[in-house]
Image: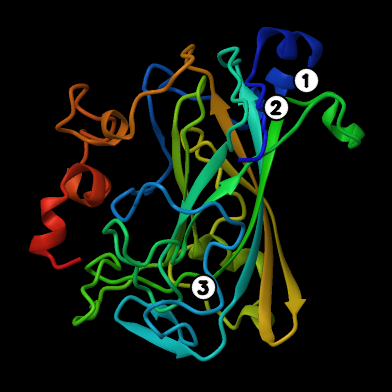
Amino acid sequence: GVAVVLAIGTDDADNHHPANQKICDSRFVPSKVDTSLFVGGEATAQAYKPNAPVKTHVCEESSSNGNNQLHKAAHWSFWRSDYKDNVPIFIKANLFSCNGGAAATRENEEVTMEVWQPRPDGTYSSIRPGIEEGDCRASVQIATTTANNEDDSLIDTNRIGTVEFETFAPGSIGILNGLVPPSSRDYPPYKPGAIHMFLNIDGYHPLLTQLSMSELNDWIPYKISKGRFKLANGKKSFNNKDSGIEIQSVTPTSRSGYNLAIEVEVNFFLVGNGKETNDTIEDIFCSHSLHRGRLSWIPSFFKEPISVCSAAHMDFYAL
């Protein structure tokens, strides 16, 4: 792999950047720093599948189910409209270190953020290993930030890296949460599709969060969006203090062949956990694991990744 070194929130970094804590204090003050996983808003890992390929395009122009030309977006809970044009989305995520992390690095290894989402038609690709790999799923490499970066704006901040990727707007999912067998379909009530993101960097609490399409609607003039994403109340800034994510900007842009394209910039705020090596995926997510999982306080089937925590369900539901 590409040689990557990610300096993770050492004390020296904090001492040399006096503005570090101000950024975190003003935008993200975690109330559960003793937990091992921050879960933002309604974030879920149900459709998560580990070991996605490393790439910068999460959803490609064509998808394995053949419905890539239809974007199914719901304007209200019991009806989805079909759009023949998809919506390209370009996302830049800035990673900030809050209250320090372990003095850890990863050398000769790709440090990535895992991203997955429904396809434009509102269905997730298969969660079975070896099937539909990389279909609206990706591990996106983190570009590290150092004090020697040519961008002078980074000198007095605690930004440790950036992630940039391209995808297409996910379709609205139904009562089956987009996990639909090939021979079936999803049913109302519908809710907005979301782009899920998971960061599990040594030295920091893992972060699971998502960007819901309804959160984009109020940022885009109606004459441009035609209300395509307006299913739930959007917010100008998704800034739940326990979510670890904050939308900075949503900008309509142009791309040849599409009526609408969107550029989104978000900030992620990571909290150090004092560990040089984080827990396994099973220990982080699964309620039946030795550590009872970090999502055990909620109905496990709707939050925990089926492919990791309850693989038998893949056969029962023909997923």
Residue 23: assigned label: 2
Secondary structure found at label 3? loop
Mark 3 vs mark 1: which is more N-terminal? 1
Secondary structure found at label 1? loop
Neighbour tally class for label 2: few under 14, some 14-19, many 20 plus, Cα within 10 Å: some
- The residue nearer to you, when weighing 155 against 27, is 155
Picture quadrant of residue 26? top right
Q: Where is residue 261 in the image (x, y as percent from the top left)?
A: 67, 74
Specify whether residue 125 is in view.
yes
For badge 2, the amino acid type reads: Ile
Q: Where is residue 249 in the image (x, y as percent from the top left)?
A: 70, 55
Name of the residue lying farthest toward the left: 316
| Distance from the alpha carbon under mark 2 to that under mark 3 | 30 Å
For badge 3, the amino acid type reads: Phe
Question: Residue drawn 59% across and 76% down?
Answer: 87
Q: Is residue 207 toward the left or the right of residue 88 in the image?
A: left
Question: Residue drawn 24% across and 30% down?
Answer: 293
User: According to the image, label 1 marks what residue?
Assistant: 19
Task: Determine whether label 1 and label 2 are within 8 Å by CB.
Answer: yes
User: According to the image, label 3 marks what residue?
Assistant: 229
| Distance from the alpha carbon under mark 3 to that under mark 1 | 36 Å
On screen, residue 208 above or below 104: below
